[in-house]
Image: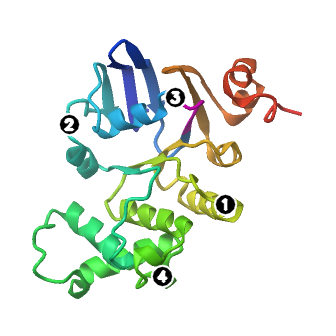
Amino acid sequence: MTPALKTNGLTKRFGANVVSDNIDLDVIEDEIHAIIGPNGAGKSTLINQLTGELEPDAGRIEFFGRDITALPVYRRALLGLSRSYQITSVFADFSAIENVAIAAQAHAGHSFGCWKPVAQDTGLTNVSRAALEKVGLAAKADDYAAELAHGERRQLELAMALVSNSKMLLLDEPMAGMGARESASMVHLLRTLKGRYTMLLVEHDMDAVFALADRISVLVYGKIIVTGSPQQIRHSVEVRKAYLGDSYAPT
């Protein structure tokens, strides 16, 4: 089976510092694949190369069998590769549905036909309301993004990704800054999307990772030291030594 996303020998250097060290990674269609590792391991640098925000020094990136190594960010997005960021990226002075409609409009290829208010485009608003419904924000459709709680803004970002006809979601620390209740809500939301979207999840919340991931890759000093199921990662002495400690050791 052709992986949804595959890298071969992906390498990125900043001067003498090798931040991505010959990374081979494959993400199977419809799985949730988590990337974990200590701060400074190179997780964000890896994601930035996958989305096209950073150009690798060596290696190859394939998306559903297509070489996208040299494609710019917008071309990858149009192919269905969507990203959420550690820091929420929404238009604070626009309503939730307007944020989603703008994302839908941009993906549809007529983002400069903006003389007609998006509220008058029933096609856009219907699609946008459906996306908000999927992420549990239907009741907040007309609220300004600035009025939403942190977790709700994360949900809004997901809705914006969903209307972009995403084939794969790159989720960069979606639980960052959340309390226990908000994190639990996000885990529940991602579970409802599981099997409908391929997801690559970068996350420090290990309870969330073990609850969601089908497979986990552990990145340490720019290298993937092991990939396996959550159970295999829990049992890995190498992973506990490099990152997890004994907190997640099997009992």
Check the image and name the residue furthest to the front: 15
Q: Are marks 4 and 2 in contact (CB under 8 Å)?
A: no
Q: Which residue is mark 1?
A: 179
Q: Residue at x 69, y 35 (%)?
A: 230
Q: Which residue is mark 3?
A: 40
Tell me the element at label 3.
loop
Q: Amino acid at mark 1?
A: Gly
* Most foreground residue, 1 or 79: 79
* Most foreground residue, 75 or 92: 92
In the drawing, does residue 156 fall left or right of residue 211? left
Q: Residue at x 23, y 61 (%)?
A: 107
Q: Which residue is mark 4?
A: 140
In the drawing, does residue 17 fall left or right of residue 176? left
Q: Amino acid at mark 2?
A: Leu
**Residue 43, image x and y in percent?**
48, 33
Mark 3–mark 2 Cα distance, whole angstroms, equals: 26 Å
**Residue 47, image x and y in percent?**
40, 37
Q: Is residue 209 magenta?
A: no
**Residue 183, image x and y in percent?**
64, 59
Tell me if residue 4 comes above or below residue 20 in the rendering: below
Mark 3: few/some/many CA within 10 Å (<14, 14-19, 20+): few
In the drawing, does residue 153 fall left or right of residue 48? right
From where the camera sits, is residue 2 visible? no
Q: Residue at x 67, y 27 (%)?
A: 243
Q: Amino acid at mark 4?
A: Lys
Disc nearer the start of the sequence (4/3) = 3
